[in-house]
Amino acid sequence: MSEPHALQEIGWPLDDHGQVAVPEWRECLEAHPQARPARVVEQHRSGYVVAEGPDDSFPVESPAEWQRRPSYRKGGIPPEARAGVGDWVLVERSGDVMQIVALLPRRSAIKRAAAGEHYKQQLIAANVDTVFVVCGLDKDFNPRRIERYLLLVKGSGAQAVVVLTKADHAADVPGAVATIAALASAEVPVRAVDAREPDSVAALRPWLQPGATVVMVGSSGAGKSTLTNSLAGEELMKTGEVRSTDSRGRHTTTYRALIPLPGGACLIDTPGMRELKPTGEEDVADNFADVAELALECRFRDCRHLKEPGCAVMAAIATGNLDPQRLANYRKLQGEVATAAGQLAGRRVQ
Ligand SMILES: Nc1nc2c(ncn2[C@@H]2O[C@H](COP(=O)(O)OP(=O)(O)OP(=O)(O)O)[C@@H](O)[C@H]2O)c(=O)[nH]1
Ligand SMILES: [Mg+2]
Ligand SMILES: [Zn+2]
């Protein structure tokens, strides 16, 4: 095993006695006495790069069963069971190459449903403490999309923070922050920054303490790589101009990468997402507590908040206390989660 402090700098959790803080991980280590722990820092189509410290990364071969096409039949390996960026794996030398021999159980997992008609999950990042939901305060600003991201983060085991970039561009920063603060529950902090300015991004330090891991998600052009470079203090990731007509990015980042920051935290940069579908495991009402609370006041228990008399939800819309677009998004997401949950159940009985 490499120096414990080098591993610790990339997030390896140690307890007060210098032991791995996760008991199941200890068991895995004991089961593979020849292997050593490493963290997946890059995921490419062709394979993985893992690290044993901030300056010590190398390519590894993945187990043969991960290289076969995913299958849901008995014994098949679903995509989310393969390592992703942020995962801890055990690696062992095998001839000339280093080989992954085990995937340590995840402490948290950010997932979405993969594109395509077959129901599949895709891991965005593993073992993260915080998710920065990054959105520009330009033409890309979209509260409905932020609601969608927050739905996926809640229940993942990680905390969400909304990071509004391009604060230097925006006409009404406090207004935008208030809009997002109102739809995100009180436990979701919202920060507006100029992602290009180190002094401005210092506002994110509370979530970047030594040992912490943060993943950034958001659409292309939101400023994730710009933020990465400002926090790292050097140009590690390529950034790209956005289209002036609609502020859309050009998918500059093409793979997920974990970057150890000088302050001791790890930051995961990801490619901008075109589509964000729920996996079916999300709890929509939990994310729309305001709507759910109003629904309790409706006269009928099974009120669909359409034209029923005594509907508290429609009353809140009439008085301006609830944004009709938020209600529409609530319904849309509920429909999507229900569909995905049905597919998930179908897959599990196969
Ligand atoms: N003025 C200003 N420009 C910003 C800010 N953040 C990002 N930009 C610009 O927005 C463009 C896109 O930034 P990127 O960092 O490449 O965006 P990204 O989220 O990494 O995009 P993908 O890698 O395509 O997913 C670049 O031209 C940045 O300079 C900001 O806070 N203020
Ligand atoms: Mg990028
Ligand atoms: Zn109602």
Image (tube, helix red, strand yellow):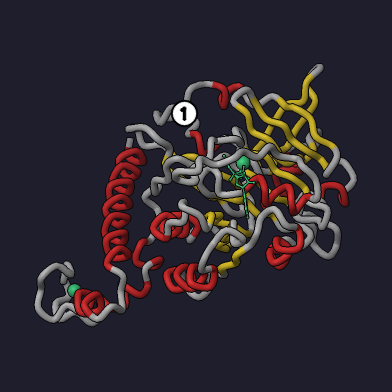
The image quarter containing residue 133 is bottom right
Mark 1, Cα crowd under 10 Å, few <14 / some 14-19 / many 20+, is some
Q: Which percent across, then down, holds residue 190?
A: 56, 68
Q: Which percent across, then down, holds residue 136?
A: 54, 54
Picture layout, residue 64 above or below residue 226:
above
What amino acid is found at the position of numbered circle 1 in the picture?
A: Gly
Q: Report the residue at 65% width, 45% height from top.
A: 225
Q: Report the residue at 44% width, 70% height from top.
A: 179
In the picture, the quarter occupied by the N terminus is top right
Instruction: Please name the residue that numbered disc 1 is placed on.
Output: 76
The answer to whether any part of residue 108 appears in the image is yes
Q: What SS does tag 1 mark? A: loop
Q: Nearer the viewer, residue 253 or 161?
A: 253
Relative to 152, 308 lies left or right:
left
Q: Report the residue at 74% width, 45% height from top.
A: 259
Picture layout, residue 89 above or below residue 226:
above
Relative to 130, 317 lies left or right:
left
